[in-house]
Image: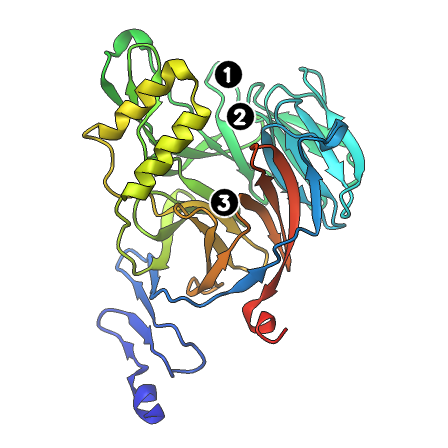
Amino acid sequence: RAMSLSATCRTLTAVAVVVTSAGCGERSTPLVTVTDSAGVRLTISRPTQDVFAVVDTTPEVSIGGAEAEGPGQFSLIRGIHVGSEGRIWVADGLSAELRIFHADGSHWKTRGGRGEGPGEFQRIRLLGPFGGDSVAVSDDALGRMTVFDAQAEMVRTARYIAGDVPIPRTHDVFPDGSLLGQTPRLLSASSMQAGQLLFDTARLVRLDLGGREVTPMAEAPGPLWLWTGRSQIPLPFTANPGLDVEGGLLHLVAGPYFRVRVFDSGAVTEVYGVSRQPQAVGESDIEGYRAMTEEWVPEPQRTEFLAVLDHPARPDVLPAYSNVVTTSTGHTWVQRFAPDHVWEVYGPDRSWVGRVEMPEGFIPSVIAGTRLVGVWRDDLHVEHVRVYRMTPARDAATR
C-alpha cells in the first residue's frame, strides 16, 4: 500500500498541479498546488481537526483591568510591538501615548501624549519595527511618522503624505521604511439619499516617506453601509479586510472564501487557503448580532441597527476570516470570523498545518516563538495586554 501511495505522488505537468496524499513523504494532509498561466501560485489544503498548538489558559503576563491605574490603564489600544529584548510597546489611543513595559509587565517608559509637537500625537498608531531595533509610530491625523530607538528615544519624524490631500489610515511598515496605508472614502452627505447603500472598498497603497509617491497595493471589499439620512449603519456580517505585512509582501483576507491573497508591488502573486465552503449565516449568528447591538449601541440608534438584519442586501454567508498575523518563522495565523477564538495556521509553504483555540476574548497581535502577545477584553470589555505561552501539539500530548 505504501508503494502504491508513493506512486501516486507525481507531477501532472499539463496543468502544473502537485498533489501530496497521505503517505507521500511525511505530510498527512492532502495538498494541491496550482500555478496558473499568470504566474499566481495557488495552494489549497484540505482542513482537518489537527491541532497546531495548545495555548495556556492562564496568562504569563497581564497588564490592565478595571482596577489598573496610570500606564496600565488602557483604552482603544492601537497597536502592540515586542522588541528584541522582550519589552512590550503599546499605543494607547485615548491618551495618545506610547507605553513600554518590561517582559514581566512592569512599566518602563511612556512617550508621546496628545499634541502636535515632535513626539506627540493626535491619532496614534503603532506600526512595528523600523530599521532594526527602532519602532515606527504614525499619526493618522497629522500624516506623520515618528521613529523611536530601542531606548524609546525619538530619533526622527517624517511626513508620509504631501500636499492638500486626504490622509490615509496607516496599517503597517515595510522593511524599506515605506508604509501600508488605506485611502479614506470621501462622500458628500448632500449627494446621498436616505436608504442608499454605500459600498466601502478598501484601497490599500504603499506610501513613501515625504509624500514622494503613493503606489496602489491592493483592493478588497469592505463593509456595506446604509445611509439613514442622518448616519451610516453597517450591514451585519460585512467587515473590514484583515491584513499583515511580511517582508515586502501583503497578506490579505476578505470575503466569504477561506483564502489568503498575497500581493507584491500591487499584483497578486499567491493565493492559499482550505477547501471549505462559505459558512451560511445561522440563527445563532443573528442572535449574537442582536445581543451585541443591545449591549453596545445607544438606545436612540438601536432600532436602526436591528432593522438592517432584515435588509435584502445583508449577506447570507459570513466572512471567512477576520484577522491575519504573520510570524518570523514564515507561518501565517488567520482568525475565523466565527467563532472568534479559533485560529487556523498555515506553514511557510502555505499549506494547512492545524488549528489553535485562543482564550475567549483574546486576539494576538504578535506571535513570537512560543509567546502570544495581544489584547484581551474582560466581561466589562476593559482592555488588558496579555502574554500567553503556547506548546506545540506534539509536545502538549506528551505532558
Q: How is the image coloured?
A: rainbow
Checking the image for residue 244, the label placed there is 3
Where, quadrant-wise, is the N terminus in this rendering? bottom left
Left or right of 260, for residue 345: right
Quick one: which residue is furthest to the top in this view?
190
Residue at the spot 25% in from the left edge and 37% down from the top edge: 315
Residue at the spot 38% in from the left edge and 22% down from the top edge: 185
From what the image shows, is residue 136 above or below residue 30? above
Checking the image for residue 391, the label placed there is none
| Residue neighbourhood size for the residue with mark 2, other residues' Cα within 10 Å, grouped as few (<14), some (14–19), many (≥20) | some
The amino acid on which the numbered mark 3 sits, given as a three-letter code, is Asp
**CA distance for labels 1 and 2:** 8 Å
Among the two numbered marks 3 and 2 on one chain, the one whose residue lies closer to the N terminus: 2
| Residue neighbourhood size for the residue with mark 1, other residues' Cα within 10 Å, grouped as few (<14), some (14–19), many (≥20) | few
Where is residue 184, by image quadrant?
top left
SS at mark 3? strand
SS at mark 1? loop
Among the two numbered marks 1 and 2 on one chain, the one whose residue lies closer to the N terminus: 1
Q: Position of residue 357 (x, y in %)?
A: 50, 56
Among the two numbered marks 1 and 3 on one chain, the one whose residue lies closer to the N terminus: 1
The amino acid on which the numbered mark 2 sits, given as a three-letter code, is Gly
Q: Position of residue 153 (x, y in %)?
A: 79, 32
Left or right of 53, for residue 336: left
The amino acid on which the numbered mark 1 sits, given as a three-letter code, is Gly
Front residue of 334 and 377:
377
